[in-house]
Image: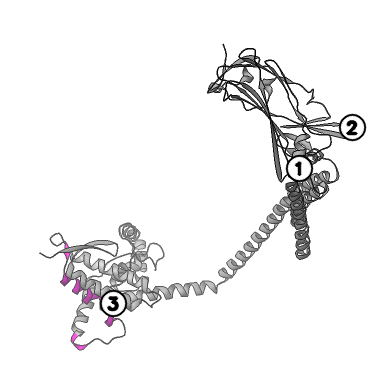
Amino acid sequence: MKRTISIHIGGYVFNIEEDAYSILETWLNSLQSKFSNDNDGSEILQDIEQGVAEHFKSMLDEAKSAITISNVNEVIRVMGAADQIKDEAIPENQEHDFVQNEEESKSNKRFFRDNEDRYIGGVASGIAHFLGVKPVWIRLAFILTSLFFAGSGIVIYLILLLTTPYARSRAEKLSMRGERMNIDNIQESVKQEFEQIKARFGDFKNSDEYSLFKQKAQNISANVSDSLARILNIFSGIIGVAIVLTTFIVLSVLSLFFFTDNRIFMPDGMVYFSDIQQLIPFSTSPFLFKLGIVLIVGIPVVGILLAGFRLIFKFKTNHKIFGISGTLLWLAGLAFIIVSGLGIAKNLEYEQNSLTNESILLRDSTIYLSLNDLGIELNSPNTKNMDNFVIKKTDDKFAIFGKPNLYVRMSSDSISHIRIERYARGNSPESAFNNIKSIVYNNKLSGDSIWIDNYFRLPDNSAYSGQMISVYIDIPNNFSIYLDKQIAHFDGFIRFKNSDWHGNNPGRFWRMTPDGLELSE
């Protein structure tokens, strides 16, 4: 028993013996090489496979389920080998076979409706192909039988129209015309169809309908192009107006910032540039830094503004001149900011700190901690609160007040201590140390009570140079501390057990534990 395999060809699946498939594959490969350079080669090969499938279908029956070598050889004999395609003389010893194949093709002629030569449904031309006559005689016969035999011609036509399929595939078309399903006829049929299509297109291209269609298409294309151009102009104009309005607003804000002491945005609200200027230790004129900011921001905004005007008014500018000038001004602004930044960094290059330590003599194991209120009115028009700093203006003077850090910790010994650390920066160690000494901050000890200022102060009209005060209160384990109500609003770094916050419990006693302060009952 021979081994079989399944193949897919012409839209059908067949079982074929392995040795038969080897012959079929060799034959198909030779045809593929033959038609590889042909413009219609792919279509011809597709129709050849369809023809092979039609032959295979006719060779199989209920008793036979696999294609054999004899079936493949028969198909190759009927359809022809690659070296026998077209324009070859028929050998004398094959003349009998040729006549026999012609007879076979006539006997295999089938009736289909002709989809390419029809007035209604292609029935008449299909019958004409089957009988080998001209379609006009069949159409005349239908007319006469309809006229003289009570419309029987119409009834017969309708029956055939409903029961007869169109010849759609290449195999069906060849069978309808009584032509052999071989390679030469398939090739000729494909080329004829291509020539017919080409001729029809040529006739249509030279017709008045084509000229009218072409003119209408050109008119539609021109109208669509004009409409799109108008829409784009309107859309670009709207974008240009939006750009111009936005950039005018930005430039107005920059102008106010540059020419006046205008407010600017900060994380904690609105402040004046002069307030920022007083906090920063500039080594150069603050005006240079201000000009740098305006140039860095303003030059790109001006470029966007010009782009908006071009979108609105469709004018052209000398991009080279504007580009070079704008780039130079932007680089100048960047240089101003860098110079100012380097000067600020130079003034804060060195740092110093000092620490004072005082022991607290207690009458018992409780400390009372209170704040000395310096009376700074944060809501006053002359006062600006900037998170950890307050700037207070009086006539032509201003003073900077800073909030100290407060730490309440467990002591490393059995004695309570208060430590005050002062910190500052400067352009030299001596300058940093002088800045430390200039900090004004007071604390007072009286028995078991401690009073500390709620702000430290810098000298009048002096810039901020990193000055900071940190207050450390160390309490032994199991000692208590009383935090008054003002301490509840103090920005400090106090560790509380179980994440309790003294702000929710003002004016209470707290006991020191290794895990932090614990609320006393």
> How far is mark 2 from mark 3, CA to CA?
107 Å
> How far is mark 2 from mark 1, CA to CA?
31 Å
Q: Is residue 373 visible?
A: yes
Which of these two is toward me, 331 or 352? 352
Residue pictured at 18% horizontal, 67% vertical: 18
As drawn, 499 above or below 78: above
Residue ID for mark 2: 395
Residue ID for mark 1: 430
Which of these two is toward me, 513 or 9? 513
| Badge 2 or badge 3: first in the primary sequence | 3
Residue type at mark 2 is Asp
Measured as percent of width and height from the top left, residue 323 is found at 75, 62
Which of these two is toward me, 112 or 261? 261
As drawn, 14 above or below 400: below
Q: Does the stretch in magenta take in 248? A: no
Magenta region: which residues? 65-93
Measured as percent of width and height from the top left, residue 9 is found at 27, 65
Q: Which mark is residue 30?
A: 3
Residue type at mark 1 is Glu
Measured as percent of width and height from the top left, residue 194 is found at 42, 74
Q: Is residue 302 visible?
A: no
As drawn, 452 above or below 181: above
Residue type at mark 3 is Ser
| Residue 453 sits in quarter | top right
